[in-house]
Amino acid sequence: MILSASRRTDIPAFFHEWFFNRIDEGFALVRNPMNAGQVSRVTLSPDLVDCIVFWTKNPSAMIPRLDRLAGYHYYFQFTLNPYGPDVETCLPDKAKIIDTFRRLSDKLGAHRVVWRYDPVFVNAQHGVPYHAESFGEIARALRGYTEKVTISFIDMYSKTERNMSGHALREIDLETKHEIARQLADVARENSLAIETCAEDIELSRYGITRAKCIDDNLVSRIIGCPLDIKKDRSQRPECGCVASVDIGAYNTCRHGCLYCYANSDHSAAMENARAHDKSSPLLIGRHSETEGHTEREARSNRRVQGELWA
């Protein structure tokens, strides 16, 4: 089993103490985001968890405590964008985030910290030249600290349109997407970075851009030193290349306040839910009633043992 922590919220930034408590107790309870009455129990034994994928914009508080994950394998998807506090309202300044990225890479190795430049949006301030220049500045700052960058273009969900309404976003037409991709790919190549796209339906291979697997069985195999027998995640969009994982997060709980966020309906909802967080609870938000049932989530290792290679 690959554990996702989490597409739905920033566990390293805001809920790492809860996460370590769950590791210590060996399980977590997760509400179905589509049906809050359905609760599953996820076993977190290192014998079953092949790898943990952390998603974050600021893991600084978690870094000194990573030794508590002895016995587990893991890597980070680290989002680092060029936007200011008018868009990413509650993040530290970029110099601090870049320093955090470097410290994490020094501790884990460059292959275990994947840079995400995501999402790319366009308006009067953030045009093609802006992204080319800003991406280049970050790429040069991270040179040698990561091996890969993943990019994606903004998806205009209704909540995203509402939250970004004051920023006069322009539709990114196909020609503009290609021009941004071409320029970012040139910068990535100059800085020894592989570049991939996340869940995009356009073909950008002419620029050396491949399709990403953010939950990546090849990277997991490299980290754990063992091949996996695992299938594509059927719960994700068709364009998504990720393999199957189990997510233990909850939507509407991230407090970074990024206006483009897909995982929050709005910042106030996230702040309200965060007040119900109890680091000692098996659930990320709230507590589990004694009268409330749960189901056991099926869990097994996907490692392909040597004997199976010749079966």
Image (cartoon, rainbow, N blue to C red):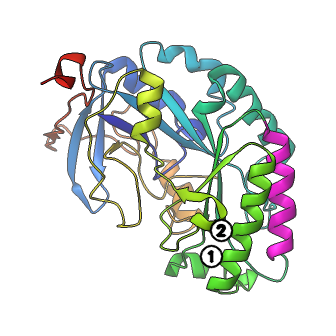
Residue depicted at 33% across the width and 28% down the height: 227
Residue depicted at 55% across the width and 52% down the height: 254
Residues tagged 2 and 1 counted as in contact (Cβ below 8 A): yes
Residue 34 among those drawn in magenta: no
Q: Which mark is residue 259?
A: 2
Residue 137 among those drawn in magenta: yes
Element class at badge 1: helix
Indicate the amino acid at tag 1.
Asn
The x, y position of residue 233, in whole percent, is 30, 53
The x, y position of residue 10, in whole percent, is 55, 45
The x, y position of residue 208, in whole percent, is 63, 58
The residue closer to the viewer here, 49 or 25, is 49
Q: Is residue 270 above or below residue 301?
A: below
Residue depicted at 64% across the width and 86% down the height: 173
Indicate the amino acid at tag 2.
Leu
The residue closer to the viewer here, 234 or 197, is 197
Of callouts 2 and 1, the N-terminal one: 1
Residue 208 relative to residue 253: left or right = right
Q: Name the residue carrying label 1.
A: 163
Determine which quarter of the picture holds residue 104.
top right
Q: Is residue 84 visible?
A: yes
